[in-house]
Image (cartoon, grey):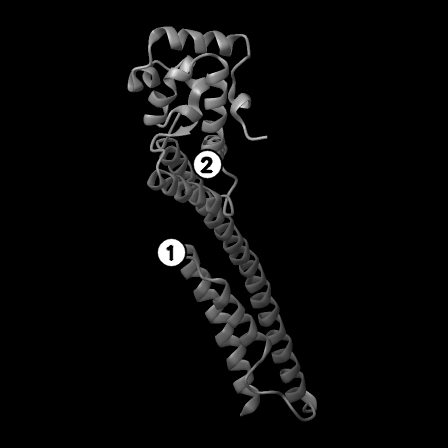
Amino acid sequence: GARFQRSAAILNCFQKVDAKLREDAASSHKVGLVDWQALRHELDVPPVAVVGRPSPGRTGAAWARLTTLEESLKAAARDRIEAQLKLANDRSSQQVVEAKLAQEQEHERKAVEAGIALRALLADGYLKDGGVEGFGQLLEALQALVALSGFCQLPTSAQEALEEGRTAARRYSEAPIRARNARRWLRGAGLSHIIGLLSTHSLLHRLPALANSVELVASCGLPRSVREELARAVADKRLSEDTLAPP
């Protein structure tokens, strides 16, 4: 009757636990946390409850021994389940940690690549393409790095690229004021005759860089004597980035 159904349920659950343990040992795909929790629930909630008074005499003693045996089976099964629950929980936690680490590493890799792409837009701290399109590309590159910084600690190279990009963006926005200040400085230095040349090549705002950049000088055809004068002005600190900076 109901009493034997209860015993059968406990024995069946014990056999399931034993089968799961063999499955767990034989396979690389470990039994999951949910499976062990289901077995614990099945063990703790037998399908049929025992009701009524115990029987007297030998029959009562037999029922008592059966109950003791059942409880022993339940205790053994419960111990095994709890041990496997701990292992499954530890594996689950480790998997979460490993997945998080892998994700962070992927974000760091993307950040390094984004930093390289940003630096490719720059030359000597300025945009290579000083037009609106070049500035738009710079803003997109900056936004990509800032977005990645929300998912990981940016690698050093990416952090440096971010700062360089921000500096280039600031210099771009300051370019009209710097160009105006460069005109004023050139007039004061007696070099007003090159204002038109530098304006044509959009280099007025980069006046201090002309002192040391052979590439820039060659790109605009600046006379050697003027470059040497600019170099002297930079050397004795009459000309610097701060000289052209907005007030």
Q: Amino acid at mark 1?
A: Ser
Residue 56 is situated, as x and y percent measured from the top left of the image, at: 70, 91
Amino acid type at mark 2: Ala
Which x, y percent locates residue 93?
53, 53
Is residue 85 or residue 187 the one in the foreground?
187
User: Which residue is identified by label 1?
Assistant: 27
Please state, as top left, top right, bottom left or bottom right, where the C terminus lies in the image: top right
Q: Looking at the picture, how far across and down is residue 227, in whole percent?
A: 39, 10
Residue at (55, 84) in percent of width and height: 6
Q: Quadrant of residue 74?
A: bottom right
Crowd band around label 2 with a 10 angstrom C-alpha radius: few (<14), some (14–19), many (20+)? many
Q: Residue at x 50, y 33 (%)?
A: 163
Q: Earlier in the sequence, mark 1 or mark 2?
A: 1
Q: Quadrant of residue 85?
A: bottom right
Q: Position of residue 59 (x, y in %)?
A: 64, 88
Against 70, residue 153 (above or below) is: above
**Does residue 55 appear anywhere in the picture?**
yes
Residue 143 located left or right of residue 86: left
Crowd rating for badge 1 (residues with CA inside 10 Å; few <14, some 14–19, many 20+): few
Q: Which numbered tag is attached to residue 169?
A: 2
Task: Kindly check if marks 1 and 2 are in contact, taking CB atoms under 8 A apart as contact.
Answer: no
